[in-house]
Amino acid sequence: MTDKDASPELLVACLCAAWCKTCAEFRDTFDKLAKDNASARFVWLDVEDDSELVGEIDIENFPTLAVFRGDKPLFYGVTMPQEGVVARTLASLTRADRDAAAIPEELAGLPAALSSRLNSPS
C-alpha cells in the first residue's frame, strides 16, 4: 500500500495533562513516533491548557489518543504508553476504507480546529 492509498494524512492527537507522570514519561515516545511517521501529523494536547480545542472532555485515563483521517475519526481511546503498542495501533488504521470510530462530541471538530493551528506560521 502506498501513502497515496491512505490519503489524506493521519492526525494523531495525544490527550494528556501536565500533572500526569505517565504522560510526561510517554512524551519522548510520542515524539519518536512522530519522527518515525513523517506522513502523519502528531499533536500533543494538554486537556487543561488546550481546553479551547478539546472543551470540557472527560478523559477516562491517560494517555488517550484520538486519530483522524481528514475529519473522519478512526480511533479514540486510552492507550498503553508503549511505542510498540501505539505503532501497531497506528499501523492498523492505515487502510483508506477504514470505518469511522465513535468519539466524544467535544472532539468532533478537532481536525478543523487544529488545521489552522498546524498550518499557521509560529
Image: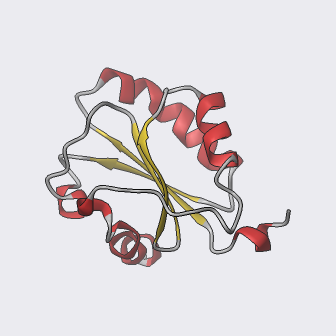
Whether residue 100 is visible, yes or no, is yes
Residue 17 falls left or right of residue 48:
right
Residue 74 percent coordinates (x, y): 52, 58
Say which quadrant the N terminus sits in. bottom right
| Residue 95, quarter of the rendered image | bottom right
From what the image shows, is residue 33 above or below residue 99? above
Q: How is the image coloured?
A: secondary structure
Q: In percent of the image, x 77 and y 71: which residue is there? A: 5
From what the image shows, is residue 15 above or below residue 29? below
Q: In percent of the image, x 30 and y 30: which residue is there? A: 61
Pick the front one: 63 or 115: 63
Residue 40 falls left or right of residue 117:
right
Residue 106 percent coordinates (x, y): 23, 61
Looking at the image, the residue that sits furthest to the right is 1
Circle count: 0
Residue 43 falls left or right of residue 18:
right
Q: In percent of the image, x 17 and y 46: which residue is there? A: 48
Pick the front one: 57 or 82: 57
Say which quadrant the C terminus sits in. bottom left
Residue 107 percent coordinates (x, y): 30, 61
Q: In percent of the image, x 62 and y 60: which residue is there? A: 40
Whether residue 122 is visible, yes or no, is no
Pick the front one: 10 or 20: 10
Residue 115 percent coordinates (x, y): 42, 75
From what the image shows, is residue 17 above or below residue 119? above
| Residue 19, quarter of the rendered image | top left
